[in-house]
Structures are given as C-alpha cells and as structure tokens.
Image (cartoon, grey):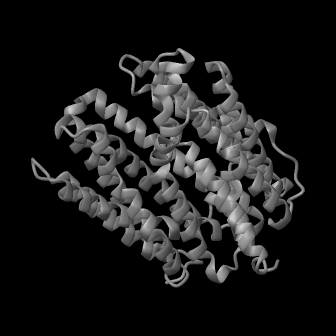
Amino acid sequence: MSDGLPLPQRIWAYGTILVALTMSVLDSSIVNVALPSMAHDLKIDAAEAIWIVNAYQLTVTMSLLALSSLGDIKGYKLIYLGGLTLFTLASLLCALSTSLPMLVTARALQGFGAAGVMSVNLALIRFIIPSRILGRSMGITALTVAMSSALGPTIASAILSVATWPWLFFVNLPLGVIAISVGLRTLPATPRSGRRFDFGSAVLSALTFGLFIIGADQFGHTGRVPIALALLAGAALSATWLTRRQLSLPSPLLPVDLLKIPVFALSMATSICSFGAQMLAYISLPFYFQYVLGRTAVETGLLMTPWPLAVALVAPCAGLLADYFTPARLGAIGLAVMTLGLTLLLFLPAHPTTLDIAWRLVVCGVGFGLFQTPNNKAIITSAPVHRSGGASGMQATARLVGQSSGAAVAAIIFNLTGVMDQMPVALMIAITLTGCGAITSAMRRFEKGTRA
C-alpha cells in the first residue's frame, strides 16, 4: 500500500473531506437556532419541533457502524461519496419541506447521508495523508470540526437575518455539488474485504443505539423514568445479542475484534469519558449562567464561545505534536488540563465577572483540544489497515455515545436537584470522568505498539 496520495491530488482529496465534514457538523448545530422559526412556519409546537433535530441525530447514530462496515466491504470512497450525495439531495428536500412529517423524513435522510461521511472519513484520511504527517492532518480535521461547531449558531443567525430558514439547507447544494465533483476525481480507491454484509447485525446495531439514544432522552422528561429504564433495558439486551453474534465473525460489524487491541480499547474508553464530561459541562453551564447569574441568552452564547475556540486553536498544534509524541502522554496531559479547568469552574466566585468565566473555559478547551487529535490518531492507527472503516466508525460512535450519556446524566441531575442547583453536581461528575480519562490515556503507554 502506498503511503498517502501524491501532490496535488492529496490537497484536493483532503479538501473534499474537510468540506463534507464541515457541512455535516454545521447541520447538527445551525438547525437549533432556526427551530422557533420552523415551528412558527409549520404551525407546530416546540415539543414537536425537537424531532427536526432528533431525527438527524438518531439516524446518524443508528447507521454509523453499519456504514463503516459497508465501507470495508465496498470501499470507503463509494460510501463517502454516496453519503455526501444523499446528504446534498436531502438538504434540497429539507429546504422544500412544507410539513413536519416531510421535514422530519428529509432530516432523517440527511442524517443517513451524514453518517456515510462521518463513518469513513478517518479511514479515508489514512489513505490520503502520509503517515509521517497524519497527526497534523488530524489536527486540521479537529480544527474544522471545532470551528464548524463554534460558528454554527453565528452562521445560522447571519443567514436568518437576510433569508428564511429553508436557506439554511439551500446553502448546502453548491458546496455538496463541488465536493462530489472533486471527490470523484481525487479520492483514492481503497482495498475491499470481499466479505458479505451482515444485515442482521446492522439491524441489531441500529436497535441498540436507537433505543439507547431515545431512552437517554426520556430522562429529561418528568414522569418518564420508567419508560427510559425500559428503553435502556431493551438497548442492553440488543447490545448483548449483537456482541454474542459478533464474537464468531472474523470481521464483525461491531468491531469486538478491535476492542481486543488494548490501545484501541483504552482510546475508546478515553473518548467516551471526555465527550461525556464535555456534554455535561455544555448542558449545565448555560443554565447556571442564565438562571443563577442572570445573564441573557445572547450573553450565555458568547460566554460559551471560548471553549470551542480554544479547541480550534489548540487542535492543529496537538496534531503536530502527535507526530512526535505518544498519544498516551498527550492525551493524559490534555485531560489533566481539562480536569483543572472544570475544577476551576466549580470554584467560581459567587459573583464572577465575564473574564473569570472566560479564562476558565479557555483552560477546558485547551485541555480538550490537546487530547482529541492524538486520541483520534491512536484509534485509527492502532487498527489494521483493512479494518480502518471499523475503527473510523467506532471513533464517531464513541463520540456520540459519550455525548448522549452526558446528556442523560445531566437530565437525571436536573430531575434530582432542579435547575438552580445542578451545576456543581454536573461539574463534579465531569471532573470524575476526565480524571478517569486521563488515567486510561496514560495506561496506553504501557501497552505494546505504543511509542514511549
């Protein structure tokens, strides 16, 4: 296997990856800003409007592992461009939607397309970028994701200031067409495993993650705890059945074979811990700023900005360092810094200034940014090349499982403590998670195949 693509093909192929990734990340954040406008135009209430967001997130999570497995079988380029094409067409359907069922269906299709992009993007990068600079390239990828996430609400507000909400989806069309055209010419053909696709495992995987996400969401609704527990029990049963089915397969859809690699398993655990902690903070802090400190919604949005901006600034540097230092060391240091930042937030003064809050959020973002890129590199490079699709899908799944778990824990805290008192409890749990993540990251240094 050649080590990366030659120039200038490498630049064009990598640019296609970044454009498609930007589109998929933006669409998971910009729609939140437009929900009130959508609800008004479609004549629906706020509870119904949430399904415009949930349909996208659910479809992405339920289909990630199946599509990453299909990438191993049919080639990553086919899955990536197929996902991007579906995402672009579904964006047109979203823009033309005139009812809630039509929009939710289009959003579900859009999520399925986004899953095609997310499931194999790291696997494709492994074939596009030479191994000697893989870390810094993943740093640029993390920068793209962080900036897209941070700028999503701002971009949405700018579009809505001059146009109606359908234009949030229309803007995807030219970008999608350009990325597909360039990708057809430049993305590399990758080896195919030749095995058959496991439809039964794909259904069980969708059930497992779908029931888990919906069950986790039910904790946020008073009186629905029994329903949440029943759904989570269903997810556990489905996961057990899925895992037992995979144990006898040489290249399973749920990559239990990769989890037997200590570095891979520890990197996955570290990822789940860190994203769970981040989501806990992202949910609890805005309520603290508005309900306890009396800040406005606009002020709260600005107060939360230093975290993702710090991630965006640090990620490329972390990628460069990942080419020279072990991910175990960088990840442990990054999560230790994030733990420090969360601890500093826990001990905010009773009447903090904007600066008091902002510099602590910067510390959290620096820590998360220092951890994320080396950890992603560890996940993708610890797997055999022919299992890159499975590794890429697991990386995206770990992120979503961590975020969903963090949201579920936040909902439980709200139900037990109330909005006014939830922040300290949420931050203490987040601190525990990042501390555990730092320990699991450091443990990778003692496993075979890691650089000291």
Q: Looking at this rendering, what residue extends furthest in the front direction?
A: 162
* Residue found at the very far right of the displayed protein: 194
> Is residue 178 positioned above or below 44 on the image?
below
Most foreground residue, 163 or 137: 163
Residue 302 image offset from top left, x and y in percent: 32, 49
Residue in the picture at 77% in, 51% down:
177
Residue located at (80% from left, 48% from top): 82
Residue at image position (88%, 48%) is: 196
Q: Residue at x 45, y 47 (%)?
A: 154
User: Does residue 55 appear to the left or right of 444 in the view shown?
Assistant: right
Residue 106 can be seen, yes or no: no
**Location of residue 345 in the rendering, given as x and y in whole percent from the top left corner:** 22, 54
The spot of residue 312 in percent (x, y) is 45, 64
From the image, which quarter does the N terminus lie in?
bottom right
Front residue of 261 and 3: 3
Left or right relative to 378: residue 130: right
